[in-house]
Image (tube, rainbow, N blue to C red):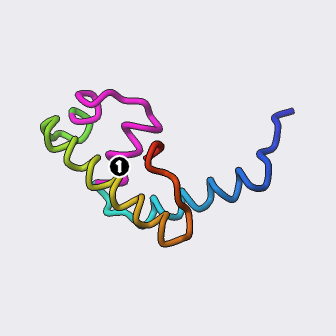
Amino acid sequence: MARQPMPAARQCREVIVECLAGLAHRQRIALSLYYFSEASGPQAARMLDIPVAALEALLVRGRRALKEALAARGVTGVEDIV
């Protein structure tokens, strides 16, 4: 039987998912491919059919927007994570 996440971890995950859902579509997809699917930069760029530099710009803007969304929800100290 799989362990159930602790309530605090579950709540944190829910907040992150909600904040990700509020990002621009391309930022959300870029972050998801890079961080959750563990695609490399070049792989994610190929999947999105964009240059690697464009992917990097999406990741920068997406991380910034995610930090702002998390901060608006009262989540701080994510500088090393996001």
Is 57 on the left-hand or right-hand side of 77? left
Where 7 falls versus 35 (above or below)?
below
Q: Main secondary structure of the magenta part?
A: helix
For residue 29, above or below residue 14: above
Q: Position of residue 82 (x, y in %)?
A: 43, 47
Q: Is residue 36 magenta?
A: yes
In the rendered structure, the answer to whether residue 6 lies left or right of residue 28 reads right
Q: Between residue 37 and residue 76, name the one nearer to us.
A: 76
Relative to 29, does residue 35 appear above or below in the rendering?
above
Numbered range of the magenta stretch: 27-45
Compared across the picture, whether 46 is left or right of 23 comes to left
Give yes or no for residue 57 being in the magenta stretch. no
Residue 22 image position (x, y, % from top left): 42, 67
**Picture coordinates of residue 26 (x, y %)?**
28, 54
Q: Amino acid at mark 1?
A: Ile
Residue 69 on image: x %, y %? 44, 66
Q: Give the residue displayed 32% in from the left and 59% down from the top.
A: 25
Q: Helix, strand, or loop for circle 1?
A: helix
Residue at 87% across / 33% down in the picture? 1
So how many labels did they put on this image? 1
Q: Nearer the viewer, residue 78 or 26?
A: 78
Q: Nearer the viewer, residue 73 or 43?
A: 73
Does 82 sit left or right of 7 as displayed? left
Q: Residues within 10 Å of mark 1 (few under 14, many from 20)?
A: many
In this figure, which residue is indicated by the disc labeled 1? Answer: 29
As drawn, which residue projects farthest toward the bottom?
72
Residue shown at the point (79%, 48%) measured from the top left: 6
Q: Residue at x 41, y 44 (%)?
A: 32
Location of residue 74 with respect to 7 vertically, above or below: below
